[in-house]
Image: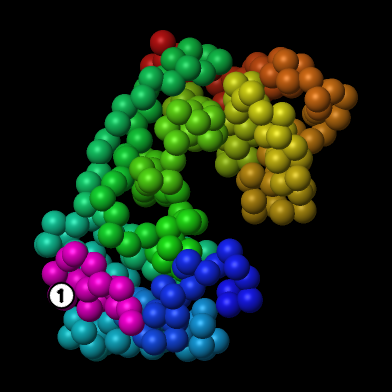
Amino acid sequence: MREHEEFKDILPAYVAIFENCEYRTFEIPDMLNDILRLYQIYYRDIFYCGLPEAKAADKLLTELRALLNMPDAEEELLAERLQTVFEQNGYHALFGKTQGYYGPYIWKDTVPTVYRVELPGGTAEYTVNILNGFVFRSWMDYLTFGRYGTGGWASPDGTINCIEQAYDFESERFLVSLLKHEAQHTVDMKQFPGITPDELEYRAKLVELHYSGNLGLLQKFLSEADESKTNDSHAIASARIKTEFTDTDQMNLSGIQARALELLNVHTKEMEEKYGKQTTVSID
């Protein structure tokens, strides 16, 4: 960073944290700051000092157990206790790993928001939790001073949680690749209770292609295609799309949209034959 002019303005902030151990403090109670400081030390250990991830993780968990006076706690119980401590102070919290590294998400408000989503089969309602008032957004956000970071995640019940600062809610990324994709999942799981993950992803990707105004979306799916990844439903679905769009002009947006709808309708008939036609699904 010292060798590149474009990092001149932000370099002092990195020096303060990674060379001088002047960790960030947040406008939260001291006990909560003590917890987040342990995660900051963990990031310095891994990304600056080069400590192996396993050793850094063991050090982090040991320090957290000591701070909470839970010396023998299993990792799951420790995470539950950490979440409780933040919730008792008025914050939402999620602990665990993102892409292989530990890092908490700490925020103030969760706002359930209901969207009416147009799909090829009608209009469906889909609820998204909008999360705002973030104090901490895991390791990638921390290392890049907010430039990059997780945009959201799915709750165990399937509800999508979107980090407000990470989304343009008028963008196709939100309106099509998230809302229409996930709403189609919800409709399909109700209509075809036995549907497989591969089938779910295939149908949702076709819905995206039908509504997308971006020629790059098909290219993205084609680049993800890999029939050998049998445990990756996205790769398998994309492989099927790659085969079925072979004769489609990939520079003709209206042709792509029409082909996607055609394939979805054919697949719906296949699903009805395979799983039986359901009549109880609520879709306008």
Nearer the observer, 171 or 58: 171
Which element carries disc 1, helix, strand or loop? Answer: helix
Q: List x then y, in percent, for residue 280.
A: 40, 17
Nearer the observer, 201 or 252: 252
The answer to whether residue 9 is above or below residue 237 is below
The answer to whether residue 211 is above or below residue 84 is above
Which residue is rendered at x = 58% and y = 74% of the image? Answer: 1
Which residue is rendered at x = 38% and y = 20% of the image? Answer: 116
Q: Examine the image and state in which quarter residue 123 appears.
A: top left
Q: Mark 1 highlights which residue?
A: 30
Q: Amino acid at mark 1?
A: Asp
Which residue is rendered at x = 63% and y = 76% of the image? Answer: 3
The C terminus appears in which quarter of the rendering? top left
Q: Is residue 284 visible?
A: yes
Nearer the observer, 60 or 273: 60
38 relative position to 166: left or right: left
Q: Is residue 181 visible?
A: no
Dot 1 alpha-carbon crowd within 10 angstroms: few under 14, some 14 to 19, many 20 or more:
few
The magenta stretch spans which residues?
Answer: 22-37
Magenta region includes residue 23? yes
Residue farthest right in this picture: 247
Nearer the observer, 48 or 114: 48
Q: List x then y, in percent, for residue 237.
A: 68, 39
